[in-house]
Amino acid sequence: MSELSERILQELIEKDSIDTLELAKIFEQDHQKIIGALKSIEAHGNLLIVEPQTRKYFELTPEGKLIVEKGSHEALIYKAIPENGMLQAEVNKLPNSKIGFSKALAAGWVQLDKSTGQSIVKRKTNSIEDNVQKNLILIADNKLSNISDKEKQDYKKRKLIQEVTIKSFLLKRGTEFSLTLPKLETDLTADMINSGNWKNLKFKDYNFEALGASPESGFLHPLLKVRAEFRQIFLEMGFTEMPTNNFVENSFWNFDALFQPQQHPARDAHDTFFISDPKNSTEFPSDYLERVKTVHSVGGYGSIGYRYNWKIEEAQKNLLRTHTTAVSARMLYKLANEKEFKPTKLFSIDRVFRNETLDATHLAEFHQVEGVIADYNLNLGNLIGVISEFFKKLNITQLEFKPAYNPYTEPSMEIFCFHPGLKKWIEIGNSGIFRPEMLLPMGLPENVNVIAWGLSLERPTMIKYGFNNIRDLVGPRVDLEMVQRNPLCRLDK
Ligand code: PHE
């Protein structure tokens, strides 16, 4: 039981009633604290009779307080007038002269003498009594009985006092009055029911007004929000999501299957994170591996290949995948090995790793968004068409394509878009038609083409949420409050 509740009950041993405001004064406590303690007493039964009270009283305004301190404006004017009077123009310069002079005039304390041709203010009486000051002192002490309603109204009008309403409670001893609060049960137990003891116990009431604890909840990071939007767009366009849950890949799927020569600079440890343990992968589809080896080293399918000594050791090396196209390669191989080829649309959005120099826009890991379509006789027109449709859903309509090079696509195109906010053309993606040297060894039919495009997730997220530095979006510098505060992602469609 709180000490305050106990003290309140003790006050009522001798007194028949007491007001909570009075208690606040006695205990030198905030009135609100008294009310809190009272509520807890009330929760324990009819210990007290509680009668709500409303009381109105007057409070001095700052101007009223000043008058208590220094005297009323009219008294100060009176006191400022010397024996032989003062020019009215001079009186007008005194503080609060306007109200002070007119009140002093009305009270008959001063008079205006114009007999000399000048307006001179003179005292009209030898002594005055500053009733305004006196009354305000009484009001401040809450002694209102000697003050007429007319006076109160006048002070109110002069904004020297203001009326305040205060609510309190008058407390009296109730039927269950006691000096201690009975212990309230919060649980009804099997024992209480079996013994019948529950009848003698007091149970705590439910507090339906309790605010409750605000539930802890998670917030989605901007990248996840933008990812959800991209995913939605792909799904709307009939794409199926690829399983991308393997950050660790081997060189075979990340590079070799994509007809990327083993001496290609991107394989260099400067660009690729190789895994030291386990260093190598050993399980590959052997027939397919042979065909990949052949197409690299001597060619085939109408290609002369790269003509170098392809080594399995290089293909075995484990790494952190450098692009999600590694996943696309695995999926296309799977597709090629189905009984019957079916046109397929696939997408992925997941993390990739590159050993890059870190700067404001580059980290060693980021997310790629990739779309892949396998169908009969697809061409560059189809690729441009589907990319245009895709970006239209992002409200990006001004697109330009620039010839580019990827070992695994021919032709290849970089995708540029005009950013109206930044007022410039920016590169947003890469795309192409996968080479026959990649698809035919997998076993896909000759008249099937695969078109694909990729972009990073970070770039559109940074543009959308206005980040200039990628470290504000990813990594230890991320402001968690930013994650909580930032709005839903709505790509302006
Ligand atoms: N894999 C490419 C990259 O990492 C993107 C790409 C995807 C290019 C599909 C062509 C086709 O940038």
Image (tube, rainbow, N blue to C red):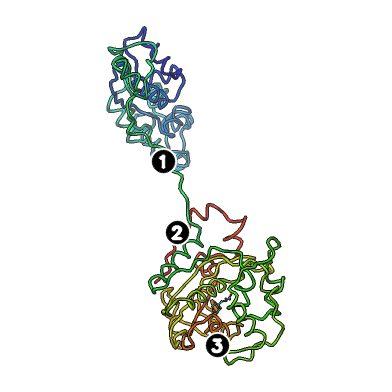
Residue 10 x/y as whole percent? 40, 11
Check disc 1 and give the amino acid type: Ser
Residue carrying label 2: 487
Residue 349 x/y as whole percent? 50, 68
Task: Answer whether labels 1 and 2 touch (C-beta < 8 Å).
Answer: no
Residue carrying label 3: 411
Q: Earlier in the sequence, mark 1 or mark 2?
A: 1
Give 314 or 148, whichever is nearer the viewer.
314
Task: Answer whether labels 1 and 3 touch (C-beta < 8 Å).
Answer: no
Residue 438 visible in the shown view: yes
Q: Earlier in the sequence, mark 2 or mark 3?
A: 3
CA distance for labels 2 and 3: 39 Å
CA distance for labels 1 and 2: 72 Å
Q: Residues within 10 Å of mark 1 (few under 14, many from 20)?
A: some
Q: Earlier in the sequence, mark 1 or mark 3?
A: 1
Q: Which corner quadrant of the image does residue 436 belong to?
A: bottom right
Q: What residue is rendered at 69% in x and 88% in y?
A: 307
**Left or right of residue 150: residue 459:** right
Ligand 1 located in image quadrant = bottom right
Q: What residue is rendered at 31% in x and 25% in y?
A: 55
Check disc 3 and give the amino acid type: Pro
Q: Residues within 10 Å of mark 2 (few under 14, many from 20)?
A: few
Residue 103 x/y as whole percent? 36, 33
CA distance for labels 1 and 3: 103 Å
Residue carrying label 1: 119
**Left or right of residue 174: residue 3:** right
Q: Residue furthest top?
A: 14
The C terminus, quarter of image: bottom left
Tell us which disc is closer to us: 1 or 3.
Answer: 3
Q: What is the secondary structure assignment of the residue under circle 3? A: strand
